[in-house]
Image (spheres, rainbow, N blue to C red):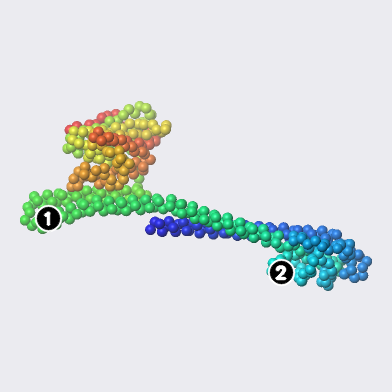
Amino acid sequence: MFQTTRRRLALWYTVVTAVLLLLFASGFYIYVRGTLIERVDDTLSHVVEVVQRSLVVDANAPMAADRINLEASFGSPPEAVEDDRIDLEWYGPTGILLWSTFKDPIDVPIRLSPGGVTVEISPDYWLRQMTRKLTDGKDVIGFLRVSHPWFEVTKPARQLIIDLSFGTSLLIALVAAVGWFLSRLAIEPIQESYQQLKQFTADASHELRNPIALIQTNVQVALTETESGPQDQRQQLMVVERLTQRLGYLVDDLLFLARQEGGMGQTQMQACPLDALLMQVVEEQDAIATAQKIELSLDLGDFASLPGEEPYTLWGDYDQLARLFTNLVSNSLQYTTEGGSVKIHLQQFQRQGLPYLKVEVSDTGIGIPDAAIPYLFNRFYRVDPARAKSALSTNAGTGLGLAIVQTITENHQGHIQVVSHINQGTTFTILLPQPMVKSMGPTFPRFVVKSEA
């Protein structure tokens, strides 16, 4: 499919460029040929004027035909014949040829025209001619015709056609090669997006199929086991509830990513006190940390380095930022073993002279291999699916949490970094730009919140 599209793109690119080149070459040829003809006509006109001024006229001759002294005006016709010479012919008032430089008179009738006229002498020989009627008062004393070889135009015109044909053909071939190369560059992002879409669809189908299949199984068991007691039915309903809840989380994450990528996500920017937001996240995750016997703490760094009434306030979407840090903390808790710790550190930070807020989420968990770090923010990517918790748990990840983290960070023009060591822990660092805005919300003092097992 993509090769066909690539061929079509290259073909259209070549055809359009070829048409433009042909139009340019045709226009250039017409212009040059017209210029050559104009130069020949100017030469003929100049020769007519020179000959007309050099004519010897006998005003006393009784007949108009006898007033031109041919011998004094023209002399003897030249015997040497040159291919590119200009020939003269003098006709009497009645149209009879009286004098000519042609060795053999040509049988071409007199044709008066304001410009030059091209005539065929033989299939291989053409002339460009200009004829003037000369008068003495009211009497016509004769006709002067000047002829110029036409090959002075056709010869360079033919050479120009050859040059333009060769040059145009070479350019079309070059354009075809370049078009084939550019079409590959144009197709690559589309092909990559298509492959990502296929992978995303396959992964989403797989993730949706598991909870749906388990829900269907539990419902079928509940319907077929008529002798099961209320306690068994309650247990099955609780499993269905957890699976439905996990399915809802997955669908919600998918819709969020789809809306953000499609430009349909509504971002409500406002003044967000990041310290208060992190307090809320810690409070929400405290119960999970306590149940897993993990120490969860929040520490605010020194903010005296930058002025402002609200040192930890930035401009952003409060709900999205809460989702970002909830996903990070939840991910750290998920992969931290019992007795470990998850620490959140917030401080002001300057990067290239601009103020930022830096949030570090560090854990003492199992760590991430170096080879897996570049793929962490891919959808449905898991370093080791076997390490994930049971699919029946509502805390089990959907594989979209870090993808959402990256999307929200980019929405806020921020940056995210990951540093990890196997069996030592992982640190996620979020840098968010902080505008110099005062009085955007309540002021929170420096504090430390800890949840200890």
The numbered dot on residue 222 is 1
Q: Quadrant of the N terminus?
A: bottom left
Q: Residue at x 15, y 49 (%)?
A: 239
Q: Quadrant of the C terminus?
A: top left
Q: Residue at x 42, y 32 (%)?
A: 353
The numbered dot on residue 151 is none
Tell me: residue 335, above or below residue 87.
above
Q: In this image, 176 relative to 29: left or right?
A: left
412, 294: nearer the viewer: 294
156, 268: nearer the viewer: 156
184, 217: nearer the viewer: 184
Disc 1 marks which amino acid?
A: Ala
Residue 42 at x, y percent in the picture = 74, 58
Disc 2 marks which amino acid?
A: Ser
Q: Nearer the viewer, mark 1 or mark 2?
A: 2
Residue 351 at x, y percent in the picture = 39, 33
Badge 1 marks a residue whose secondary structure is helix
Q: Residue at x 28, y 44 (%)?
A: 401
Measure the alpha-carbon separation of dots 1 and 2.
Answer: 106 Å
Image quadrant in which you'd find residue 80: bottom right
Tell me: residue 341, above or below residue 174.
above
Q: Residue at x 22, y 37 (%)?
A: 336
Classify mark 1: residues with Cα within 10 Å, few (<14), some (14-19) or many (20+).
some
Farthest residue to the front: give it: 80
Q: In this image, 100 relative to 9: left or right?
A: right
Classify mark 2: residues with Cα within 10 Å, few (<14), some (14-19) or many (20+).
few
Q: In this image, 281 relative to 128: left or right?
A: left
Task: State yes or no: discs 1 and 2 in contact (Cβ < 8 Å).
Answer: no
| Label 1 or label 2, whichever comes before in sequence order | 2
Residue 172 at x, y percent in the picture = 53, 56
Please name the residue that numbered disc 2 is placed on: 122
